[in-house]
Structure formats: structure tokens, C-alpha cells
Amino acid sequence: PEVRILVTGGSGLLGKAIEHVVTKQGGARDGEEWIFLSSKDANLTDLAQTRAIFEKHRPTHVIHLAAKVGGLYLHMKENLQFWRDNIRINDNVLHTAHEMNINRVVSCLSSCIFPDKTTYPIDETMIHNGPPHESNYGYSYAKRMIDVQNRGYRSQYGRKYTAVIPTNVFGPYDNFNKENGHVLSALINKTHTAKVEGSPLQVWGSGKPLRQFIYSLDIARLIIWVLREYEEVSPIILSVGEDDEISIKEAVEKIAETLEFKGEIYDTTKSDGQIKKTASNAKLRSLLPDFEFTPFPQALKETCDWFLNNYDIARR
């Protein structure tokens, strides 16, 4: 095929979502070959392994999702490791792509990279306007550097390297680990366990923080659109609107309702992380006004169903 798209981090939440859209929902175009890499295929912190896997597949396009990630408490403990591993991964992937004359790379940033002290809503121009939240500064700064590097490849070599910034993603194939998983998926697992054991559901923190949750299959469709259509080097926020923000407390109640958990729910005194990170999706809307997001209750139900049906293989 003329177009070979290599997806790093192909076994993670977003990689699996893109694979689902491409293989099961007709998201691939004629003449496109999609290759999904996992950490088993190559250790991307190692330049030689990165080059070897690129040589093997000879991609024409790259969607770069691979990263060292973890939950809030792991980040607080290992900021240096998150910085070093992610800087290495990103430099290896981007520079190998450049060396192999790949003109199109879309990398994935995270909404946690934005400045801790900021005005809301956050938009794409504000990434570098001050330090990120102290809890995961290593990861956040490493992710911000992708934007710096993209601009370098554009200005020095004319490459079309850009990045997307999703808000809180959830969906099938997520990491449902109760301590290190994404917030919604960890809560789904906790709620299921409490239901099975007949125990109360303990939710960490106050339940007050607000988040924009976006379904992984929606993000997948948007990333594919960015790869094909988006021309700017400047990143683009992929998110539901500001009005669609919901509190952790509301999310917990919706999960309990979806999983038919009838027990007692109470909050503990653990850290909340950031109270809000409201992001503007105005840029996305200006370019793609008609995109329809999956309604939260439907997306949540599909995620819960997937978790229950794949309980044995789910990361938890």
C-alpha cells in the first residue's frame, strides 16, 4: 500500500480505540495499511530498537501515542523517571521519523501539561505559560517538549509534525487498575468489586473536581481526522465542550447506576489533584463543526459492558 500508518502505543487505550475504528467501523481508507506497535515490539526508550522497528515497517505516517504513564501517586514518587523515559521515547520516535523522511507525525499530549496557575478555559496557546501541576511535572514537561520539537522540524525541515491534546479519555481497553488507572476506569473497577463483595464503595478525594470526559472511540476518529486533514504545527485540543464538564461525584453516581451498585458510597480524605482543568474545544469546533460526540451515559455503558465482558483480559 502507498500509505502505511505506524501507531506507537498501539496496545493502550487510544491505540486500541484507533484499531477498533479502523478495523471494525470502516475507518480505514483503500490503500492504507495500519500497523499497531506495543512495548513488546520495541523499547522506544532505546534508539537502536526504535530505528529497527521503523526500518522493518517503513511507515509513511506515524501516530505517536507511546509514553510512560502512571497514576497520580506514582507520578508524585517518580517525576525524574517520567521525564527521562518520555524525553527519550519522543526524541527517538520523532527523529527516526525525520531521518526516514516521514513527513507526517501526529503525537499525543495530555491536558495535564497545562500551567497549574491559569485562567479558564484553557486553549492551545497557553501550554507554555507557566509551570505544570507539581504532582507530575516530569511527565508534563516531557510532553510539552514534543511541541517544541515539532516546531523545530517544521521550521528547519518543513515537516508536518503536530500534536493533539485530549482531555480525560475513557473507554474499552483502558487500564482499570484501582490505583494507577485513569479515574473513570479505576472507579468502574472499584464499583464492580464493591458490588461483588457487598462492601461500601470508597472514593478517593472529595468528589468535587470537574473533568471533561471523552470517549476513546470519539478521540480515535478525531486523531484519524487530524492525521489526514489538520495542517497546523500548533497542537489542537480534542475534547467535549466546556458545558459537558462533570464532577467526579456525578461520574461515580452514574457508574453506580450503570453497574447497578446499590451499596453505600463515601469519600476519603486523599488528594484531589487539580480541581478543574476546563479546556476550550473552540478550535476543533471551528474546523469540524458537525462532529458528534457519543453521549456520556452511552459511552459509559459501553465501557462498563466491555469491562464486564472482558474481565479476564482487562488491565486491572
Image (tube, rainbow, N blue to C red):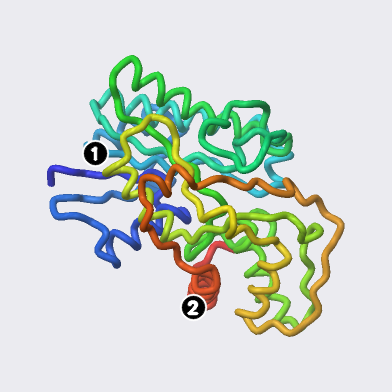
Residue 43 seen by the camera:
no
Check contact, mark 2 vs mark 1: CB within 8 A: no
Neighbor class of circle 1 (other Cα within 10 Å; few <14, some 14-19, many 20+) is: many
Left or right for 77, reference 58:
right
Query: Where the C terminus falls, by quadrant?
Result: bottom right
Left or right for 79, reference 223:
right
Give the vertical position of 28 relative to 148 (above or below): below
Give the vertical position of 53 relative to 268 (above or below): above
Q: How many numbered marks, from 0 up? A: 2
Neighbor class of circle 2 (other Cα within 10 Å; few <14, some 14-19, many 20+) is: few
Disc marking residue 204: none
**Amino acid type, label 2:** Asn
Q: Relative to the observer, which residue lies in front, 154 or 306?
A: 154
Disc marking residue 309: 2
Please give the name of the residue rendered at 47% of the width and 56% of the height, measured from the top-left corner. Answer: 13
Please give the name of the residue rendered at 33% of the width and 27% of the height, measured from the top-left corner. Answer: 96
Percent coordinates x, y for residue 41 in the rendering: 37, 45
Question: Residue lying furthest top in this view?
Answer: 156
Percent coordinates x, y for residue 314 in the rendering: 52, 66
Residue 92 falls in image quadrant: top left
Please give the name of the residue rendered at 36% of the width and 45% of the height, measured from the top-left corner. Answer: 287
The first of marks 2 and 1 along the sequence is 1
Percent coordinates x, y for residue 31 in the rendering: 13, 51
Residue 10 seen by the camera:
yes
Q: Alpha-carbon distance for marks 2 and 1?
A: 34 Å
Disc marking residue 59: 1
Give the vertical position of 299 relative to 274 (above or below): below
Local secondary structure at mark 1: loop
Local secondary structure at mark 2: helix
**Amino acid type, label 1:** Pro
Percent coordinates x, y for residue 227 in the rendering: 31, 43
